[in-house]
Image: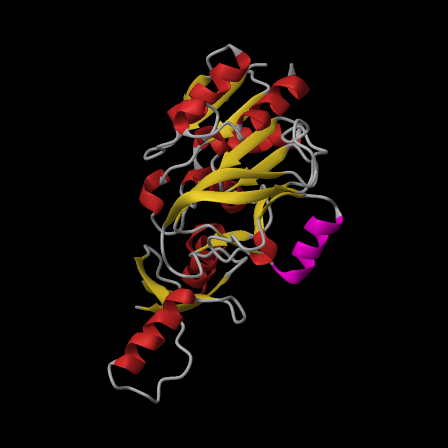
Amino acid sequence: MKARVFVTLKNGVLDPQGKAIGHALNSLGFPGVGEVRQGKVIDLEIAERDESKARASVEQMCEKLLANTVIEKYEIEISP
Amino acid sequence: MKSAVVVFPASNCDRDAAVALEQVTGQKPAMVWHGESELPDVDVVVLPGGFAHGDYLRCGAMAALSAVMRDIKAKAEKGLTVLGICNGFQVLTEAGMLPGALMRNARLKFVCRPVGIDVQESQSVFSRKYESGQRISFPVANGIGNYFADAETLDRLEGEGRVVFRYADDDNPNGSLRNIAGILNEKRNVLGLMPHPERVCDPLLGGTDGRALFESLFESLS
């Protein structure tokens, strides 16, 4: 199965890169852009056919390595 | 006092730390590769500055999982003194040995310059040769040195006298919350700080304010 993990900063944690992107978009002539938050996407291939087992395993990976849960949150999408 | 310095792939302040330790203790520290499963029998271990594993994923994330860190974590729980400088501080937070996290500098720039530091707490094996309230100068060299923790953790760190070093009020180089530059763990045997005391231990390098940190360790652990 394939897993896509979205890692983003928790709400309330300052995101200076997101702010800089927002300013850049404003200066490019997109005045309607409000708050911008940036994060990362991690794609994984997993040798597992059962969706719930794959999800559980990726959750463990997020807790142990892929995200720093002091400052980041994560979302997992599983696909065949 | 027997010491060791861990060398991760892309550490770059390991030799600076070794020189500072040797100047103060008169003994060469053991240089320990990150893949070693056991730390030699030492009184203090230094996790040096640099860009371990190229800062991939997050600074210190890979290094925190290295073989030698497992041993260091176990020994720190039994009282081993651990000093993490810059990237070493990031490794300590990623390993869960210190609370909070280091984030990208508030103004997004890599900052490399001397900054004013206030010693907040002289009651530790790392700072007893300083006086509480003393203003010193250490260089910083980081892009990801912006200390973050939730308000409850910050209150606790302050309440328990675990903020050892703070950036001078008008000289916070990276946006660290409450100007935090260096903190202790609960048992007070692990210190992480972003500025570089090892770079100011010799007058030829422009200052000697860092020497007292290594002298504090020497006095405490010899």
Q: Is residue B155 magenta?
A: yes
In the picture provided, is A34 more to the left or to the right than B26?
left
User: In the rendered image, is residue A32 in sight?
Assistant: yes
The answer to whether one can see residue B35 in this image is no
Farthest right residue in view: B159
B201 and A12: which is toward the camera: B201
Per the picture, the main secondary structure of the magenta-coloured stretch is: helix
The outermost residue toward the left is A28
Which quadrant: the C terminus of chain B? top right
* Quadrant the N terminus of chain B occupies: top right
Name the residue rendered at 66%, 55% in the picture.
Answer: B154
Residue stretch rendered in magenta on the structure: B150-159
Counting from the top left corner in percent of width and height, residue B67 is at 45, 31
Q: Residue furthest toward the bottom?
A: A32
Rendered image quadrant of residue A43: bottom left
Q: In the image, is residue B210 above or below residue B221?
A: below
Rendered location of residue B221, percent (x, y): 65, 18
x, y percentage for residue A77? Answer: 38, 70
